[in-house]
Amino acid sequence: MPDGFTGFLFSEPQGPPADPFPWYIQTSRDLLTDLGMIQAWDYYGFPYLDGSWWTLPVQLFAFCAAAWLFPRRWRTDRVMIWLVWVLMVAAAVRFLVFNPGRTPIQAVNVFFGLGLQRTHLFAAGIALWLWSRKRLQSWHLGLLVAACIVVQDLHVFPFHRAMPQDPARWPSTIGFAVLLLVICLAARGPDWWFPGLARVAPALTWLAGISYGLYLVHQELGYILARALLDIGVPGRLRLPAVLAGAVLAGWALTAWVERPLHRRLTVRRAGKPVQEPAKAQVEEPEPVSVGGAS
């Protein structure tokens, strides 16, 4: 295979092995376990239909926690900042105290099954939102971002001893830190504007609108389509665009035919129910204050 980025994307693979590993054919049991997100509770007993779906319990935890926290009278900025630190410290203590090699599998299954292994990211998201609304000072956000980076490093490299994957430790941690900083700039900084952006903005907006459906279908279907095209002799320069187009088409179909109709059905007002005035906000927007001072 030729070296370089272009060679990686478009060159022909070295060829399938003489005895290729057979494709796993999913059954109705696999479909039911995926719908119930059972894999995180027994990773080795139930395969994922799509490898990227390990994030679904994490997303469900974050969505439910955010929905539960939002309409609460006690949800003041001070309380939320304390909550962020509690989540961050609890995540750090978990990785510092429990060694994965000695932790009971039942405890690990609870963390992964409920999506609790990434609570530090949820806490960082709360901090970023408060900071973007000028309700958290920059120095405090810096401390929380630094804590999140440390916890993420502990999560990816948690064994407390030298491991074969350690050479990838610093690139992984630095990449995560840079990503957080970019998100901070996007959250509070001025809108970015580049020459020619107006021309591609509609396409980017459209892709953003189908991004969740695209996430759900792109990986496994992309593998299957790429393998099918390879088997019939489609060259790499045509195979990659075909896989990208297939993923976008499948993501759009899932969004247009499943996600949006269900959203409309779940959010439509019941027939005959009188339209009520919007309720008054339970939490007023305060002026920016120092989190260490009076509020």
Image (cartoon, helix red, strand yellow):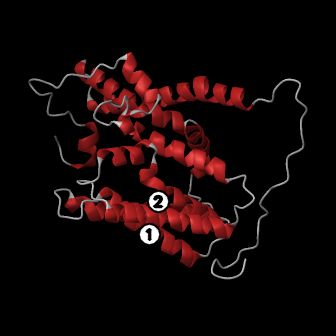
Mark identifier at residue 120: 2
Front-lying residue, 241 or 78: 78
Front-lying residue, 183 or 272: 272
Location of residue 121 in the rendering, given as x and y in whole percent from the top left corner: 48, 57
Q: Residues within 10 Å of mark 1 (few under 14, many from 20)?
A: some
| Marks 1 and 2 in Cβ contact (< 8 Å) | yes
Location of residue 24 in the rendering, given as x and y in whole percent from the top left corner: 26, 22
Element marked by disc 2 = helix
In the rendered image, is residue 122 in sight?
Answer: yes
Q: What amino acid is found at the position of numbered circle 2 in the picture?
A: His
Location of residue 281 in the rendering, given as x and y in whole percent from the top left corner: 81, 55
What residue lies at 62% left-to-right and 41% top-to-bottom? 202
What residue lies at 49% left-to-right and 74% top-to-bottom? 143
Q: Is residue 259 left or right of residue 17?
A: right
Q: What amino acid is found at the position of numbered circle 1 in the picture?
A: Ala
- For the C terminus, the quadrant is bottom right
What residue lies at 46% left-to-right and 30% top-to-bottom? 36
What residue lies at 66% left-to-right and 70% top-to-bottom? 78
Tell me if residue 249 comes above or below residue 76 in the rendering.
above
Q: Residues within 10 Å of mark 2 (few under 14, many from 20)?
A: many
Mark identifier at residue 197: none
Residue at the far left: name it.
Answer: 18
Q: Earlier in the sequence, mark 1 or mark 2?
A: 2
Location of residue 82 in the rendering, given as x and y in whole percent from the top left corner: 58, 68
User: To which residue does mark 1 refer?
Assistant: 147
Question: Residue 186 appears in which quarter of the rendering?
Answer: bottom right
- For the N terminus, the quadrant is top left
